[in-house]
């Protein structure tokens, strides 16, 4: 085999290669060859459609997925923990791409509107934390009468969900795993959710949805809607799916994610602390609930938002004889359920934005395991193969 010469390797990648090859006790050439071989096998590996699978439900089932609107990879982590293998990722934000590369060794594709259908490989699960945008269903009847586009192509035109729906229509993944903010159900007087659900059903999927509070998995009150869809031609109209029940053991405690010696720069200045107290008092006098969130150490925090970098007011940590402090970026990562071995490679501001926008991997993991149960059921029902029904 001819030698390969790779020039201008970025310093952070070179450092990572050195670290990993030493951990694995391999030469640089051996390590790089193993990376290439694994990448080749992943790219050319089968989906569940490509060959018979004989499994027992208790053993789980390996599956493939694509990670769209990937952010920093919260859904990917959860799906990988459930036995999944990622075949493609897409994320437009360049700072999130930087984190994704550091964590997973690949740079996601950029603007989803510029991706060709052929660029997205076949997979068993399409995962997407798609943005919520307002839709309008007015005028559909009129457009039908004029012979114009109708259905989801009318109702969702011009939104990112339209792009996602078009990908689903063309790729026909057996399972969809989608995540969004809790208010998706009530957004735009419930019209947004009505359009999304009807679109997914029009595309031939049975739709399950549930609002799940991540407080059962991380010490943070964080409600998000999780949507799981199964292709009716493969699973029929009534697949035996159910959302996971919250664990029975005690909920995580906020104090468990705190660093022992945080930098003093995270302590609020006298000026900012006085401003937050005055702001809260003003709104309390008006009967409003706006204000800072001083977190109980043995409880759970408020929801971490993407705006946390501005003043940290929604999640503040009490300190003895000091003003409260905000979370450090590492604590914000822990609050979302990201392990310490994943490095923070962006500024504090970008880190807060990324974690505030992220998906809790633990939630996705338990939902994905329930999806795997359905995949196992379908395989067993069809003598070891995943088959689409005519």
Image (cartoon, rainbow, N blue to C red):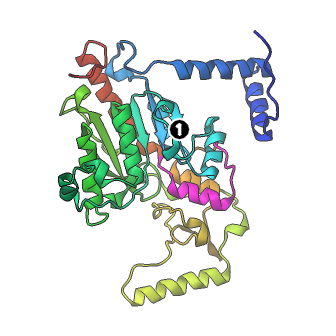
For label 1, the residue is: 89
Q: Secondary structure at mark 1?
A: strand
- Left or right of 132? Residue 151 is left
The image quadrant that residue 350 belongs to is: bottom right
Q: Is residue 319 at least partly visible in the picture?
A: no
Give the residue at x 79% y 22%. Answer: 28
Q: Is residue 170 above or below residue 43?
A: below
Residue lying at 53% horizontally and 54% vertically, measured from the top left: 335
**Magenta segment: does it hold 116?**
no
Is 78 drawn above or below residue 18 in the view shown? below
Name the residue furthest front: 146
Give the residue drawn at x 23%, y 42%: 202
Quadrant position of the N terminus in the picture: top right
Viewer-proximal residue, 213 or 86? 86
The residue under the point 43% across, 23% down is 62
**Which percent across, then down, holds residue 362?**
45, 43
| Mark 1 crowd level (few <14, some 14–19, many ≥20, 10 Å Cα) | many
The quadrant of the image that shows the C terminus is top left
Does the stretch in magenta take in 343?
yes
Residue 336 screen position, x and y as percent: 51, 52
The magenta-colored residue range is 341-360
The answer to whether residue 198 is left or right of residue 159 is left
Residue in front for this viewpoint, 278 or 309? 309
Examine the image and state in which quarter residue 283 appears.
Answer: bottom left
Residue 302 x, y percent position in the rendering: 46, 64
Viewer-side residue, 51 vs 169: 169
């Amino acid at each position: 085999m001819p030698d390969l010469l790779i020039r201008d390797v970025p310093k952070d990648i070179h450092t990572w290669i050195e670290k990993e090859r030493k951990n694995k006790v391999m030469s640089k050439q051996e390590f790089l060859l193993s990376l290439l071989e694994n990448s080749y096998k992943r790219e050319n590996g089968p989906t569940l459609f490509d060959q018979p699978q004989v499994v027992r439900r208790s053993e789980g089932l390996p599956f493939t997925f694509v990670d769209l609107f990937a952010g920093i990879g919260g859904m990917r982590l959860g799906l990988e923990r459930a036995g999944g293998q990622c075949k493609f990722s897409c994320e437009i934000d360049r700072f999130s791409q930087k984190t994704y590369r550091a964590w997973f060794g690949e740079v996601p594709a950029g603007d989803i509107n510029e991706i060709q259908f052929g660029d997205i490989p076949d997979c068993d699960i399409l995962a997407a934390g798609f943005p919520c945008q307002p839709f309008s269903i007015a005028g559909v009847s009129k457009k039908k009468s004029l012979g114009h586009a109708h259905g989801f192509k009318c109702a969702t035109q011009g939104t990112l969900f339209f792009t996602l729906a078009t990908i689903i229509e063309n790729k026909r993944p057996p399972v969809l795993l989608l995540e969004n903010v809790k208010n998706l159900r009530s957004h735009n007087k419930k019209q947004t959710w009505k359009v999304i659900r009807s679109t997914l059903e029009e595309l031939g999927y049975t739709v399950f949805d549930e609002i799940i509070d991540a407080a059962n998995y991380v010490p943070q009150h964080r409600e998000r809607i999780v949507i799981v869809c199964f292709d009716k031609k493969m699973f029929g109209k009534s697949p035996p799916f159910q959302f996971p029940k919250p664990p029975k053991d005690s909920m995580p405690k906020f104090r468990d994610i705190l660093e022992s010696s945080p930098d003093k720069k995270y302590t609020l200045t006298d000026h900012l602390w006085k401003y937050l107290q005055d702001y809260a008092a003003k709104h309390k006098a008006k009967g409003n609930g706006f204000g800072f969130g001083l977190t109980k150490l043995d409880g759970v925090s408020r929801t971490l938002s993407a705006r946390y970098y501005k003043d940290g007011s929604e999640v503040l940590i009490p300190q003895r004889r000091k003003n409260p402090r905000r979370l450090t970026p590492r604590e914000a990562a822990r609050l979302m359920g990201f392990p310490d071995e994943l490095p923070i490679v962006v500024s504090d501001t970008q880190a807060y934005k990324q974690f505030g926008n992220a998906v809790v991997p633990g939630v996705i993991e338990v939902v994905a395991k329930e999806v795997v149960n359905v995949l196992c059921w379908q395989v067993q029902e069809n003598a070891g193969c995943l088959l689409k029904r005519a």
